[in-house]
Image: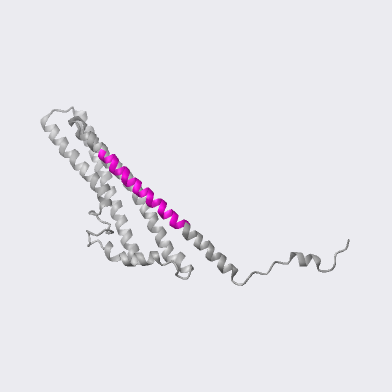
């Protein structure tokens, strides 16, 4: 059966798009991206507080075991290592959260006509509080910040306590030489771990201050 002229062209012709459909589609995609990013921030924030709880719980348990008997003082050397590992995980999530905030404020919001103002407004309002000279502030990221103390402070305290306890124990008893050497080697490794942890915390603080200034 013969088809009338132009029959195939009529069936293949695209349906005209509604004016502004492409723009609305792009906005919907970007809003969906924004929702996903906010969910990612919430997920990482939840993990951060789980890490803090694990750090407090593990440090408290190890310290309790260490002070229960003089022979257990070497257990204090475990705390700086766990603090370094857990602190590094906290800092990693902190870095990614700040990265997402910067992306939303500097890229995603501008493509949506600066309609997403929360990140930019928050950075502007909290900028004075992250000045490193203002140590006793809720958002100032410095050695007196509670989160810094949970990781860096606990690790440093355990390191000092282990050294003091070891000197006291060795002055009142005569431990075997290999025990003293092993303790000294582990203590030196802990010093390296604690130093690396404090440097990481300092870089996180500097990164946060730089983000606030560039906002």
Q: Residue furthest left?
A: 172
Q: Is residue 68 left or right of residue 97?
A: left
Q: Is residue 51 magenta?
A: yes
Residue 98 lies, in percent from the top left, at 37, 58
Residue 12 lies, in percent from the top left, at 74, 64
- The answer to whether 13 is drawn above or below residue 35 in the figure is below
Q: Is residue 72 magenta?
A: no
* Residue shown at the point (36%, 67%) measured from the top left: 121
Total numbered labels placed on residues in the image: 0
Q: Which quarter shows the N terminus?
A: bottom right
Q: Residue furthest bottom?
A: 19
* Residue shown at the point (24%, 50%) measured from the top left: 149
Q: Which range of residues does the magenta coloring cover?
A: 36-60
How was this image coloured?
one colour
Residue 182 lies, in percent from the top left, at 23, 33
Q: Which quarter shows the C terminus?
A: bottom left
**Residue 215 appears in the picture as rendered:** no
* Residue shown at the point (16%, 28%) measured from the top left: 175
* Residue shown at the point (25%, 54%) measured from the top left: 145
The dominant secondary structure in magenta is: helix
- The answer to whether 36 is drawn above or below residue 64 in the figure is below
**Residue 96 appears in the picture as rendered:** yes
């Amino acid at each position: 059966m013969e088809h009338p002229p132009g029959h195939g062209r009529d069936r293949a012709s695209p349906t005209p798009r509604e004016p502004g459909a492409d723009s609305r589609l792009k906005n919907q995609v970007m809003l969906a991206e924004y929702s996903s990013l906010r969910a990612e921030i919430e997920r990482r924030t939840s993990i951060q507080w789980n890490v803090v709880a694990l750090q407090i719980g593990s440090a408290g348990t190890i310290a309790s075991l260490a002070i229960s008997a003089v022979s257990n003082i070497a257990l204090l050397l475990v705390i700086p290592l766990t603090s370094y590992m857990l602190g590094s995980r906290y800092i990693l999530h902190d870095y990614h959260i700040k990265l997402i905030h910067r992306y939303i404020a500097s890229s995603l919001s501008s493509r949506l006509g600066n309609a997403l103002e929360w990140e930019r407004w928050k950075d502007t309002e909290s900028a004075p509080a992250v000045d490193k000279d203002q140590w006793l502030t809720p958002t100032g990221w410095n050695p007196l910040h509670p989160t810094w103390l949970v990781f860096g402070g606990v690790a440093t305290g355990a390191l000092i306590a282990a050294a003091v306890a070891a000197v006291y124990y060795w002055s009142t008893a005569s431990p075997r030489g290999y025990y003293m050497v092993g303790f000294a080697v582990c203590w030196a490794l802990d010093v390296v771990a604690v130093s690396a942890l404090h440097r990481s915390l300092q870089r996180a603080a500097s990164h946060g201050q730089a983000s606030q200034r560039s906002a």
